[in-house]
Amino acid sequence: MEHVLVCYATRYGSTGDIARIIADELRAAGYRVTLSPVSDAIDPGDFDAVVIGSPLYMGKWLAEAREFVSRFRNSLKSRPVAVFSAGFTLRERTSNHLTAVDEALGSSVKLFISPISTGYFAGKLDPDHMSSADRAIVTLTGAIPGDFIEPDEIKKWARELSALLSGG
Ligand SMILES: Cc1cc2nc3c(=O)[nH]c(=O)nc-3n(C[C@H](O)[C@H](O)[C@H](O)COP(=O)(O)O)c2cc1C
């Protein structure tokens, strides 16, 4: 059975929630799945395929996710890798928003790897559980708080990914 690593960076947990939905869907499709935060202790070289996710903060992936890709680029290059991003702008997957994410990934993650699939998902904004600095930024940008995670969108992407991984 193919062993897939689903790993993620997160500041407040919602990207982990998205990663868990992806992991569950891949398991339902018959894959053995390890779900883990990005960390030096996880070696993508131990897996047949890898999914990496990060939330967007100020237009970029979190540093630990970018560093994970850079550090493990050799093993990531030699196996299928899919990436996904979470962010409040992705509530509306307009071409402007997707292009902004693609540009951010193009100047970081995609310098090192060529993902077989890229997911774009709305996340969660909960100012009550944020640092005061982050809360101030949310207030300044006028972003609307809420849980915008769309499990059906995420499951659909995971099913398409599963088909790609199995050569379908
Ligand atoms: C300070 C701050 C900056 C953010 N910047 C962006 C951004 O540039 N683009 C975006 O789409 N979402 C942005 N977001 C929304 C987060 O990506 C979203 O809330 C995500 O679900 C958080 O993931 P986490 O709970 O895993 O940390 C920002 C949120 C905060 C608090």
Image (spheres, helix red, strand yellow):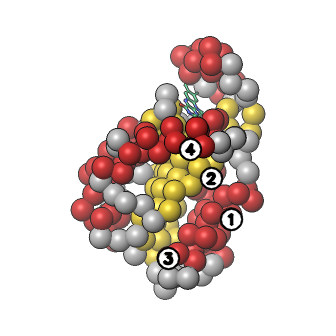
Task: Name which residue type carries label 3.
Answer: Leu
On the rendered structure, is 71 left or right of 139?
left
Query: How many angstroms separate mark 1 from mark 4 (CA)?
Result: 18 Å
Looking at the picture, which amino acid does disc 4 mark?
Leu
Between 50 and 10, the one nearer to me in the picture: 50
What is the CA distance from the residue labelled 3 to the residue labelled 4?
A: 23 Å
Q: Residue furthest bottom?
A: 1
**Circle 1: element type:** helix
Query: Which residue is pictured at 50% across the width and 76% down the height?
Result: 165
Question: Amino acid type of disc 2?
Answer: Ile
Residue wearing tag 1: 156
| Label 2 residue near ligand 1, CB within 8 Å | yes
Q: Find numbered disc 3 in the image and state the secondary structure of the residue it sits on.
A: helix
Q: In the image, which disc is placed on residue 98?
A: 4
From the viewer's perspective, is residue 104 above or below residue 118? Answer: above
Looking at the rendered image, the disc whose residue lies closer to the viewer, 3 or 2, is 3
Q: Residues within 10 Å of mark 1 (few under 14, many from 20)?
A: few
Location of the C terminus by quadrant is bottom right
Q: Sequence-wise, which precedes: disc 3 or disc 4?
A: 4
Position of residue 110 measured from the top left corner of the image (x, y, whole percent): 36, 51
* Image-based side of 161 in relation to 103, left or right: right
Q: Nearer the viewer, residue 118 or 86?
A: 118
Q: Nearer the viewer, residue 103 or 156?
A: 103
Q: Where does label 2 land, which residue?
A: 18
Label 1 with label 3: CB-CB less than 8 Å: no
Which one is earlier in the sequence, the residue at label 1 or at label 3? 1
Q: Are marks 2 and 1 in contact (CB under 8 Å)?
A: no
Q: Disc 3 versus disc 2: distance between alpha carbons?
A: 19 Å
When asked about the image quadrant of residue 126, the answer is top right
Image quadrant of ligand 1 equals top right
Task: Residue under label 3, please give it.
Answer: 165
Pointer 3 or 2: first along the chain: 2
